[in-house]
Amino acid sequence: MTSPGTRPDDVPTNGARVEEALRLLSGMPLDLRAAGKRLSRGGGVYAWWAAPSTFPDLAGPPNGSDPSVRMLYLGRATSLRGRILRNHLRRSGSSTLRRTLAGLLVAEGYRTIWTDRVVLVPEDETRLTAWMHAHLRLTWAEDPEPETIEAALVQRLHPPLNVHGVDPEHLQAAVVAAKHAYNTSSRPDEA
C-alpha cells in the first residue's frame, strides 16, 4: 500500500521489512528497566532474550550483538509499550509469555487461582515480574503491520517458547507441557 508522496517502488516489501526487523531484533538487548523507558507506542515485533543457563534445554538462536544470550520468545504488538509494560510485565491472564514462564518455573512454587481464567496469585505476579527483570532482556523493531512479518520471523528463528506458527519439528515438548500444566493448575469452582 502506498501513501501520498510515496511511489510503489518506495514501499518496502515484506521481505525487506522482515530483514530490517531481524537486524533490529539482533541488536544489543536491553534490560527491562531501560527498555521500558525507550519503548514506543507504535506497533512492531519484539524478542525476549536470556542466558542459556536460564532454561538450558530450551536454547534459541543467539543474539547477533550479544552471543551470550539466546532468544526465548518472539511476539507482535499494535502498541509495543502497552504490550510489554501492561501485559508481559504485569498480568498472566493476558500474556502467553508469562503463563509459559510460570509453567516452566513450576518448581519455584508459583501459585494460581481461577478468575475467568487461570492467573497467578497477586504475590506471584509480582514475583514473576521480578524474575523477568533479573533474567530477561528485550529487543524490538517497530513496524506498522507487525502481523505480516511475525510469522516469517517465527518460521525463520524458531524461538523455543513460541508454539503458534512453529513447524512441528521445532515445537518444544517441555514448553507444551509447561503451558498445559499452567492451564490446568486451577479450575473454576464447581457448584
Image (tube, rainbow, N blue to C red):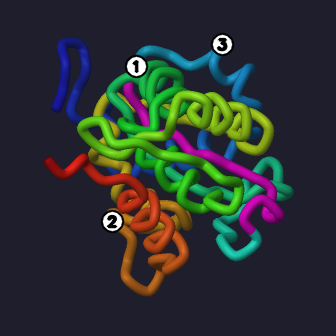
Dot 2 amino acid type: Gly
Question: Which of the two discs, 1 and 2, labels the residue nearer the N terminus?
Answer: 1
Residue reaching furthest front? 191
Given residues 13 and 74, the one toward you in this image is 74
Question: Which of the two discs, 1 and 3, labels the residue nearer the N terminus?
Answer: 3
The crowding category of the residue bearing disc 1, from other C-alpha atoms within 10 Å (few below 14, some 14 to 19, many at least 20), is some
Give the residue pinned by disc 1: 42
The crowding category of the residue bearing disc 3, from other C-alpha atoms within 10 Å (few below 14, some 14 to 19, many at least 20), is few
Across and down, in percent, residue 165 comes to 33, 65
Identified at 21% across, 34% down, the residue is 8
Q: Quadrant of residue 182?
A: bottom left
Given residues 160 and 153, the one toward you in this image is 160
The disc placed on residue 52 is: none
Magenta-drawn segment? 42-55
Give the residue pinned by disc 3: 37
Dot 1 amino acid type: Gly
